Image: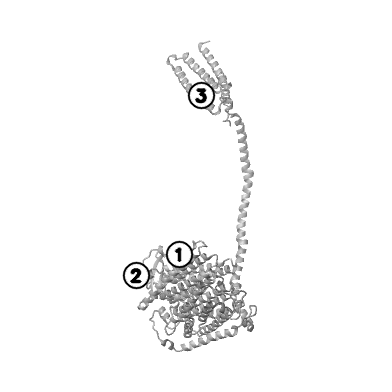
Amino acid sequence: MTPLAGFLLVAALLFAIGLAGALTRRNAILVLIGIELMLNAANLNLIAFWRYGPHPEMLTGMMFAIFSIAVAAAEAAVGLGLVISIHRHAHTTDLDQMNRMKG
Amino acid sequence: MQESISFTPQLAVSPITGILWLIPAVPMVASGGMALLKQARRKTAANLAVGSLSISLLLSLVAFGHVVGLWMGGQTAREVVNFTWIQVGATNVDLGWVLDPLSAAMLVMVSFVGLLIFIYSVGYMEHDGNFTRFFCFLSLFAGSMLGVVIANSLLLLFMFWELVGLTSYLLIGFWYQKPAAAAAAKKAFITTRVGDVFFLLGIVWLFAQTGTLLFFNHGAGSLEAGALSALLMQPAALGLTAAGAIGLLIFAGAAGKSGQFPLHVWLPDAMEGPTPVSALIHAATMVAAGVYLIARVYPLMQAGALTGGTTTALTVVTWVGAFTAVFAALIAVAQNDIKRILAYSTVSQLGYMMAGLGMGGVAVGMFHLITHAFFKALLFMGAGSVIHGSHEEQDVRRMGGLKDKMPLTFITYAIGMLALCGFPLLFSGFWSKDGILEAARHWTVARTPFYMLVFGALLTAFYMTRQVAYVFFGESRGEKTAHESPKVMTVPLAILAFFAVALGAIGTPAWPWFRVFLEGHAASFGMQGFNEPGLMLLMGTSTVVVFLGLGLGWMIYGGKSPKAEEPDALERAVPMVWGWLRDRLYVDEVYGGTVIAFYGWWGQVADWLDRRVWGGLVAGVAGLFAGWARLNRFLDTNVVDGSFDKGCEELSSSGGLLARVQSGRVQSYLRIVALAIIVLAAILIWSSRA
């Protein structure tokens, strides 16, 4: 097994854990954490493909990962802000009760 | 009214002529003010009415004095103020007012008699609930009548003429709760309208021929030499010149207003109005408007006459007048309503005036107009006093013996009655009627009008004696005790009675002041006026006629007090003739059988046409559209709506299906996203392997 396959397996595992968390948890914050896990799995892939790719000297994967982390930080900030505002409004963070926008 | 229009007098006029428009304007403005008053403000209304007409009287007297001054100074006493009212292209419609002896004399008469009647009305209408409205109409009437008098334009005269007609309608129908009054008002309005249509035709024709409706305009007016000779050159139908035809059309208007046969039918019915109205409008002023109109357009009526000759128009005026004089006097003999007798007497006297105008000229007719205005107003107001005093009784057969209970009314009434009969020497009516008979005697066309008028005089003396004998002599036949009227009513009676006697002084053959004043000669006093051949004989004849009438009347009716239910003394003698006269010679019935029946029939035809023909057409078209609409509705409900409803149902059910997916739960959306990614990944893997 090449080192790349190992990394990819870990990343896939991490993504699956994140997805499962996001789909099953009822608490909005835990869902956000699941989403973070999936993002980090993607970052791990970016780093792995860069390190074992044809041009490890060009730092492209690193750049992608840093961008992605910055976007994830912004997304987490917005997401948490929304959760706080919803909590203030509805006194809950349970996603199942936030179904007022159904069709 | 006129002050909003700027105008520049063509020539300098005296100040009084410049403000002559105030004479009609003041009462009209007062009337407008009264229209805004509450009904309860009786005193204010009465003060406004009497005050405004007093101002008019004052101005009229000043104007009269001014004209007399000019005349004494030997100048032509005619001043006009004209201004342009409407300008269309090169055509002007001019209005204006005129001050000359004719209008000045008429102004004084109208405002003076009017003022006395106003004062009398304050007493007569005291208990009426609509006192303020009454004075509002009365003032409007006085203003309009004064406007007719000063108008220097046939158009302006016509406007005021119609205003007079309107106020007459309003006042006859003043007690509109009474069906008879409402009907009489309508009848008066419609009957005079018949004459007015002809009058308007005459106005339009005159305007088309001469291009101006001004009477006098420094040589360019329609009554001045230039326009008249042009009118005489213009032939009309039936051998008449345009001047003659227009004159006849204008006379038709005058006949409507002045109650000449055959348009006299409205005047006796107009007695349904309050008695002061009868006195003011239907005795003294409005009915005189027709006579005044003929006097005003006299140059037109006379145009083309040779010296001592006459014209077709004047001949027609004479015959109509003379016939009306006898016709109405005959009917008056057999009437029992005190006001109706006076009404027919008025029609008869208006006939005298018209005949006087036709045969003797402006002065003869106008003198009788002025004297008649005074004594007829006196008689009407006396009758009002009698009615008031005997508790609204109007049937002369139910009165009697009032001379002791109402002495003041009796004395003044007797003076008015003697003036109307033409009692010799003392009373004004004698002189004015003599003037007309004198003119008739010299008329070159025929002698018949003279005999007719003498016969009329006999009848006048007879029916007035009958009335006075019934009302004031004999025993009382009324159910209630009569009482004398208040001072506010009897004082105007006394003043009028004075003038009914005194006015004769300005028109005797010895001192024919009024005639020379109107004709513009110099006056002179002298007994030689009586020296004219035949004059003494004529005066003797008319004296004999008057005494014959009085004597006959007294012989038949004097000192007796027949019951109301008994047949009249004359009825026993000639029942058939009496029946004709009592039924007013069937003129109303003839109109009912011809004109009104024709209109009724025509109305029915129009009704049938409306219902069947036009109505049918309309109903057919409407039915067509209704059918078309019903078809459209069927298509809409079953075809268009059906498919649309189906489509909507489809949309809504599929929407419901999709809506179930939109649960609003974030995680279920996420699940779908994950599922989709898995499917996509599966496809990708599967396709890359192949």
Q: Which image quadrant is residue B667 in?
A: top right
Is residue A62 left or right of B638 when viewed as pictured?
Answer: left
Would residue B81 be found to the left or right of residue B463 on screen? left
Q: Do circles 3 and 1 both sit on a common chain?
A: no
Residue B452 percent across, percent down from the top left:
53, 83
Q: CA distance from mark 3 to mark 2?
A: 102 Å
User: What amino acid is labelled 1 in the image?
Assistant: Val
**What SS does tag 2 mark?**
loop
Q: Which mark is residue B12?
A: 2
Q: Are marks 3 and 2 in contact (CB under 8 Å)?
A: no
Which residue matches tag 3?
A: A80
Assess disc 2: are there few (<14), some (14-19) or many (≥20) residues with their C-alpha within 10 Å of its C-alpha.
Answer: few
Q: Which amino acid type corresponds to the residue marked 2 in the rendered image?
A: Ala
Dot 1 surroundings within 10 Å: few (below 14), some, or many (20 or more)? some
Q: Is residue B207 visible?
A: no
Percent across and percent down for residue B473 are: 58, 81
Provide the chain ID for the residue under circle 2.
B
Q: Is residue A61 above or below residue B495?
A: above
Q: Secondary structure at mark 1?
A: helix
Query: Colour scheme in the image?
Result: one colour
Residue positioned 54% across, 65% down in the render: B130
Q: Nearer the viewer, residue B690 or B113?
A: B113
Closer to us: B471 or B575? B471
| Nearer-the-camera pick, B40 or B27 | B40
Disc 3 packing (10 Å; few <14; some 14–19; many ≥20): some
Where, quadrant-wise, is the C terminus of chain B in this rendering?
A: top right
Q: Give the residue pinned by disc 1.
A: B29
Q: CA distance from mark 3 to mark 1?
A: 87 Å
Say which quadrant the N terminus of chain B sits in.
bottom left
The disc, 2 or 1, on the residue closer to the chain's N-terminal end is 2
